[in-house]
């Protein structure tokens, strides 16, 4: 039965669509809002929940946005993105990933989240399955369900370094599988698949020609593993025609609020995605597109500099977390997240689940992290270390004091 709400102004019932019952609010967005409210009320909270760099957008990129405003580049653009940004994306894919695309194969969207939503809306029919390895970014399953898809979530725990095996992928695929959604490096775990692991996954996917591969490479340049980053289509070039490679400027260039994501993929699918976008948001922000063009085309030293800071914070914060009683965290290959197994800490405190443990840290330590159950990994907490080293030191000290019962 549809949910019915009584109107406060008259007796006409307000009925919500059934699809809204399939999804839940994003736990990361909800936590960010809660931390903001607590701070506004005067509480001293260290927020380690939000997934965005603490750096300002590099000056030369911001200046491109200012120039766009001052030159009057403030009108609608083509739905799929301006030609110069498409060309910059094509050059980036060639330079960084050895992937060749043409303009009809490129779509620019209002963030990579919209890119993925466009894709699911364009290719999923009711009952189609989407294989999403867990732990996963919180929005993947809900976006699949909004598109009438069915998420199938094979899980990989810390014993597998949070990466599924080829055998797990093979077992998860059925005749109803339409999309395999891969995120590497991963939000929330920071784990990245090696080239050899991607090749092994590709061996499975070759046997299932109905499956489209979607790879979210958003954290490609926030990366420090010994083996160079490898995108799926780079490792499996024969699956290029079945792969949509998704990326954006939000994380690598500290441009989260500029809202620019993009993809390269088969022209037919990209055209369908553009049709979805044209009937929802239409073109991305004109000013942001100009800034993103400069970000991708300019010298990339700013990316490497930010990455150095993230790596230093990773090393410091992970070591500190592993010294806390009942905390276990694996070294990450990239991103700016520490994904902590806190199951032992929960047991030591007599807490039922990771939601209760996150609440304990918020109330007793004034430290906000996101419960792992929202990422399909109960018993974990995700912390963002995209904050200053001083803030990380304070967070560790507060959590240590709370866990000691002081």
Image (tube, rainbow, N blue to C red):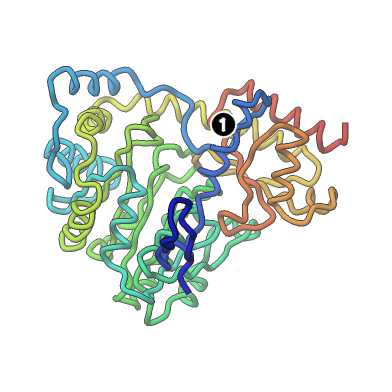
Image quadrant in which you'd find residue 247: top left
Front position in the image: 102 or 109: 109
Q: Residue at x 71, y 31 (%)?
A: 366
**Quadrant location of the C terminus in the rendered image:** top right
Q: Residue at x 77, y 37 (%)?
A: 323
Q: Residue at x 44, y 68 (%)?
A: 131
245, above or below 401, in the image? below
| Extreme-front residue of the structure | 10
Residue for badge 1: 36
In terms of secondary structure, where does tag 1 sit? helix
Q: Is residue 304 left or right of residue 165?
A: left
58, above or below 201, in the image? above
Front position in the image: 10 or 400: 10
Q: Is residue 308 left or right of residue 370?
A: left
Label 1, residues with CA under 10 Å away: few <14, some 14-19, many ≥20:
some
Q: Is residue 216 left or right of residue 367?
A: left
Q: Is residue 366 visible?
A: yes
Front position in the image: 9 or 172: 9
Q: Position of residue 62 (x, y in %)?
A: 29, 21
Front position in the image: 262 or 70: 70
164, above or below 298, in the image? below
Q: Position of residue 346 (x, y in %)?
A: 78, 51
110, above or below 256, in the image? below
Q: Is residue 197 visible?
A: no
Image quadrant in which you'd find residue 12: bottom left
């Amino acid at each position: 039965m549809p949910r019915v709400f009584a109107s406060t102004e008259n007796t006409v019932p307000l009925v919500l669509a059934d699809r809204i019952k399939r999804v839940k609010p994003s736990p990361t967005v909800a936590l960010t809002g809660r931390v903001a409210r607590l701070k506004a009320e005067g509480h001293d909270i260290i927020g380690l929940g939000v997934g965005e760099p603490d750096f300002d957008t590099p000056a030369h990129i911001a200046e491109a946005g200012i120039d766009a405003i001052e030159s009057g580049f403030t009108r609608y653009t083509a739905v799929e993105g301006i030609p110069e940004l498409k060309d910059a994306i094509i050059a980036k894919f060639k330079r960084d990933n050895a992937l060749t695309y043409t303009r009809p194969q490129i779509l620019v969207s209002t963030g990579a989240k919209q890119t993925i939503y466009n894709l699911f809306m364009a290719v999923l029919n009711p009952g189609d399955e989407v294989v999403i390895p867990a732990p996963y970014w919180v929005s993947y399953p809900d976006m699949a369900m909004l598109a009438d898809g069915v998420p199938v979530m094979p899980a990989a725990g810390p014993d597998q370094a949070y990466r599924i095996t080829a055998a797990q992928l093979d077992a998860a695929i059925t005749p109803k599988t339409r999309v395999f959604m891969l995120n590497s490096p991963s939000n929330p775990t920071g784990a990245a698949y090696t080239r050899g692991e991607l090749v092994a996954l590709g061996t499975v996917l070759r046997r299932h020609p109905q499956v489209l591969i979607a790879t979210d490479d958003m954290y490609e340049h926030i990366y420090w593993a010994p083996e160079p980053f490898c995108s799926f289509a780079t490792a499996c070039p024969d699956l290029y025609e079945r792969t949509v490679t998704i990326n954006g400027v939000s994380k690598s260039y500290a441009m989260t609020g500029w809202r620019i994501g993009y993809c390269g993929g088969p022209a037919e699918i990209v055209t369908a995605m553009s049709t979805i976008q044209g009937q929802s948001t239409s073109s991305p922000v004109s000013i942001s597109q100009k800034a993103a063009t400069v970000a991708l085309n300019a010298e990339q030293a700013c990316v490497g500099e930010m990455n150095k800071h993230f790596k230093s914070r990773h090393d410091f914060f992970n070591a500190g977390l592993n010294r806390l009683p009942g905390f276990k965290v694996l070294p990450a290959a990239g991103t700016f997240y520490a994904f902590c197994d806190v199951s032992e800490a929960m047991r030591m405190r007599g807490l039922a689940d990771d939601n209760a443990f996150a609440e304990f840290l918020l109330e007793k330590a004034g430290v906000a992290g996101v419960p792992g159950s929202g990422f399909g990994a109960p018993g974990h907490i995700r912390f963002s270390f995209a904050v200053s080293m001083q803030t990380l030191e304070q967070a560790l000290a507060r959590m240590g004091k709370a866990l000691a019962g002081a």
